[in-house]
Image (tube, rainbow, N blue to C red):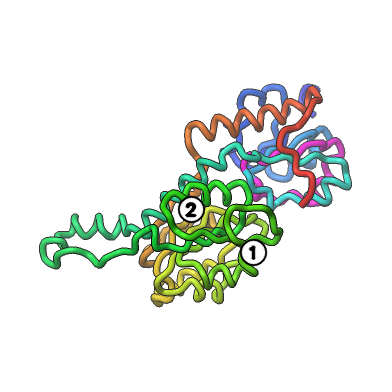
Amino acid sequence: MAGGKPGLVLFTSNLERMCEPIAERFDVLRLWSEGDAAIRERGAGVVAILTSGRDRIDAALMDRLPKLRLIVAVGAGYEGVDVSAAKLREITVANAGDTHSGDVADHAVALTLAVIHRILPNDAWVRSGTWETHGYPPNRRALSAERFGILGLGRIGRAIASRLAPFGAEIGWWGPTDRPAGWPRHESALALAAWCTTLIVAARGDTRALVDRRMIDAVGRDGCIINVARGQVIDEDALIAALRDGRLGGAGLDVFCEEPAPPARWANVPNVVLSPHAAGVTVEAMARLRDTAVRNLKTALEGGAVVNEILSR
């Protein structure tokens, strides 16, 4: 504990802006520059961790931080946090809750429209002169003719479905837990993939390769897949192979197994629209995320109620 200040662990430099208004009240352990030495030398004074949600925060790390009482994920995801281990140690875990769900849903719809309306290929059609030499591009499907399958009907999934409803298309969903909804729940993820023409992935980020080759092939050569969850929810190698082979019609991806995504991996992959994990990154959302994170970090210093506490896995 430096200068008597309680410790705050940050894993990456981009988290500094998320705690800037309160950082001076903490001894900040910057693991990207200080490494494990910071934990060895000052871990005994750490009371809070600020995480992207993907950082590995397991029982072994918690045991090295005996005063830790709060883990705050700045986004909706917290798949790197062992919530069960935290609960056993009476450590509170919180995330962003509904803070930026609407912005993520907006981006998911934008990717969906870009893929179905072939915005990038049509832009190239005009710029390359193909319009002059070959006439109009192939026809696309009307949005009202789509069957949108929402994989994961949490806050973001519901927001996506609500935004798509005015287009007049059919909407269905699947998630591991049945819950009241205005749209039918399919019997399995695979059944949803076989039914839909566009599969929109909004599932929890701790699910690995839920969208595997079988599901990708079920969506098929005339369908597309949109992902705003986490990269590992999809078997990325299988997705790339399906796009290259023409077994999948298209994709829109905001998240990747490796981030930043290596450009060479996607250089020659056809019919895909990419964005750099930016779905929730609006000016307004970032301000709300920071305010929520700061509010929760203050509870580590002053007590009070934590917002968006994760009560169970």
Residue at the location (62% across, 28% down)? 291
User: Residue 177: horizontal and vertical position, in percent?
Assistant: 71, 59
The tag on residue 9 is none
- The magenta segment: 53-75
Residue in the image at 55% along x and 46% along y: 159
**Hey, which residue is sitting farthest left in the picture?**
132
Q: Which residue is mark 2?
A: 254
Q: Is residue 72 magenta?
A: yes
Q: Quadrant of the N terminus?
A: top right
In this rendering, the answer to whether 60 lies above or below 307 is below
The quadrant holding residue 28 is top right
144 vs 64, left or right, is: left
**Which residue in the structure is indicated by mark 1?**
208
In terms of sequence position, does the residue under pointer 2 or pointer 1 come before the other?
Answer: 1
Q: Amino acid at mark 2?
A: Asp
Residue located at (24% from left, 58% from top): 124
Magenta stretch secondary structure, dominant: loop
Label 2, secondary structure: give it: loop
Q: CA distance from mark 2 to mark 1?
A: 16 Å
- Say which of 133 and 102 sits in front: 102
**Residue 96 against residue 303 in the figure, above or below:** below
